[in-house]
Image (cartoon, rainbow, N blue to C red):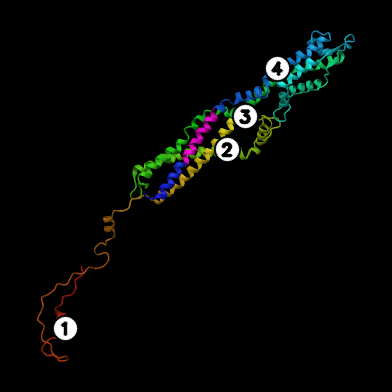
Amino acid sequence: MQRPCWTFAFGIICVLVVPGAVLTHMSVIELIPSIEDLPGNIVKGFDEVFKFAYLTQDSKNVKTASATVVNECGFSNAAVTCPNFKVNTLTQGKVVSTGAAKTAIQKAFANSLSIVSKIANDKYLGTADLQSTAKNLEKITADLNKIKPSMKCYEAIPTFCSIYTSADGIVAGISEVDKAINSFKTSDAVTMFEDNKQLLIVLHALPYFLVLSLIFFGCFWWKGGVCCCCRGGSKCGTLALLPSILLWIASFVIYLVVMVVGLGIKYAADKIEVPVLNGKPTLDVAIAHIQTNYPKFWNVVFADMVDGLDLLLLASFFFVAACLFQSLYSSLEICCCPYRKKAEPKAAADAQSPAPGLLGPATTPVESKPDVEQPAQKPEGVVSLGEPSTQNAAAAEEPAAVCV
């Protein structure tokens, strides 16, 4: 394997994409249905968890139980009697049993009215549209505490008529309750998710932007990782760099936005207001309040969506890291060219051997001459006057060196 460290680093970048892609698909699978069903889940949470769906019927049951006691005191139509009732001296001494009526009213509260009253009086969920219902339920609760097992009619009729009138007010004001629920269902946050839910489908394809970017860069890498403007570069490999860069930019920008927004919501929730709630609490306070006091409502409405968003944020960590590593690796690889092929040995030898005439003048070899008979040696210091010196003769006969 050539350049194992460089190859291993490229492999790490490819491996980082795998968990990011898996987490992205998992998050989208959870987010699509939870966001599509968010308005319906809000209604479901109020109707089934908070029992608002039973508010009308249980209020009517309270009216019926109260009317029964009024009838026993001699007034057949509580709807007519109760609004303008004055104690009748003829019936004020009559004693009636109120146990069954009280039990029926308590059953209605156990079924739905208690939790509805809690929500209507909640400091955040108890919006202005629920205040009329809250006051009527508080009045019923106060009158319920006045009921004795048996009561004289002059005591029973005012008490049960008050309960009847309050229950009738709840039934008459049910439209205000529906308006309050619709305000949660059509809030800006819910509308934003609704308007952008189609974008979630695109998120399924998002991981493959970076996958394709790595494939195109892999083509450049496979061709030697050298630009065509450099020695040994590949035109085909260089052309693959352009789509690789464009796909890298798309993947990096989208996942960076997801990461920044996710971290902003997660760690700056104390600065984000929730205007749809009473008092406009910050997001962190609202979440903590609902999770602590109404966990079932949280699970029905928000749990799946929050889990999906957490998975998407985690996926963005992997992809942003992979994009940054790919950018660093690509830049260094293009600059350093670690996979450039080495020169051939013969070409290298030719490149190293100097050209003639570049390193200095060349000399031609001196032509050898046949041996010449040397004259007999004379005694040292004795010189013949008529004969030239042997050394001078040799020097005269020896040709000079020729420079080319």
Hey, what amino acid is under mark 4?
A: Thr
Snapshot quadrant of residue 177:
top right
User: Which label's residue is closer to the chain start, 3 or 4?
Assistant: 4
Could you tell me residue 260's position as x and y percent?
56, 40
Question: Residue drawn at (62%, 40%), measured in percent from left and top?
Answer: 267
Spatial distance from mark 1 to mark 3, Cα to Cα? 120 Å
Which structural element holds mark 3? Answer: helix
Hey, what amino acid is under mark 2?
A: Gly
Could you tell me residue 191's position as x and y percent?
59, 27
Spatial distance from mark 1 to mark 4, Cα to Cα? 144 Å
Hey, what amino acid is under mark 3?
A: Asn
Q: Nearer the viewer, mark 3 or mark 2?
A: 3
Residue 352 seen in this snapshot: yes
User: Which label's residue is closer to the chain start, 1 or 2?
Assistant: 2
Check disc 2 and report the residue beneath it: 262
Q: Is residue 263 above or below residue 357?
A: above
Q: Could you tell me what secondary structure mostly forms the magenta stretch?
A: helix
Spatial distance from mark 4 to mark 2, Cα to Cα? 41 Å
Which structural element holds mark 2? Answer: helix
Check disc 4 and report the residue beneath it: 56
Q: Nearer the viewer, residue 143 or 194?
A: 143
Graded by Cα atoms within 10 Å as few (under 14), some (14 to 19) or many (20 or more), the crowding at tag 3 reads some
Could you tell me residue 308's position as x and y percent?
56, 33
Q: Answer yes or no: do the residues labelled 3 and 2 have beta carbons within 8 Å?
A: no
Hey, what amino acid is under mark 1?
A: Gln
- Direction from residue 160 to residue 241 in the image, left or right: left
Which structural element holds mark 1? Answer: helix
Check disc 3 and report the residue beneath it: 299
Image: magenta residue range:
16-32
User: Which label's residue is closer to the chain start, 4 or 2?
Assistant: 4
